[in-house]
Image (tube, grey):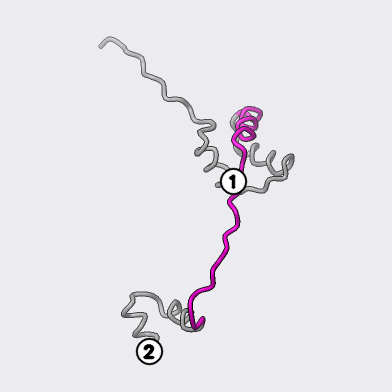
């Protein structure tokens, strides 16, 4: 069967089929690096020191602590740990 026919039947691109055929067998097992571990206490302390400025927290992590983390990962971890999240307060009851 041609590459084009295989790709059409499986609804995938011809380049994908070509790559699979070129490997001539199962894909090699890939090993992922460990995820970056950030200490929630360190992030909380830096959040207070930097008055909530995430860009400055990012800079301090790199400069002072030697932790290379992308900005988007830092934001995600802050959200996961609930750092900087405003507590939802009840609204005031006002007479109509």
Q: Is residue 22 magenta?
A: no
Residue 9 placement (x, y as % from top left): 31, 80
- View extreme (top): residue: 95
Residue 25 placement (x, y as % from top left): 48, 80
**For the point 42% across and 25% down, which residue is it?**
88
- Quick check: 46 left or right of 89? right
> What separation in Å lies between label 1 and label 2 (alpha carbons)?
46 Å
* Residue on which the image places disc 1: 71
Q: Quadrant of residue 53?
A: top right
**For the point 52% across and 43% down, which residue is it?**
76
**What secondary structure is found at the residue carrying circle 1?**
helix
Q: Quadrant of residue 51?
A: top right
Vertical order, 12 against 83 (above or below): below
The span shown in magenta is 23-51
Residue 2 circle label: 2
Residue 6 placement (x, y as % from top left): 36, 83
């Amino acid at each position: 069967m041609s590459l084009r026919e295989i790709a059409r039947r499986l609804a995938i691109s011809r380049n994908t089929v070509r790559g699979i055929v070129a490997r001539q067998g199962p894909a090699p097992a890939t090993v992922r690096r460990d995820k970056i571990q950030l200490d929630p206490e360190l992030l909380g302390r830096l959040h207070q020191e930097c008055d909530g400025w995430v860009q400055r927290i990012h800079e301090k992590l790199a400069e002072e602590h030697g932790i290379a983390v992308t900005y988007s990962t830092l934001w995600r971890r802050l959200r996961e740990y609930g750092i900087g999240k405003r507590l939802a307060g009840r609204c005031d009851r006002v007479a109509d």
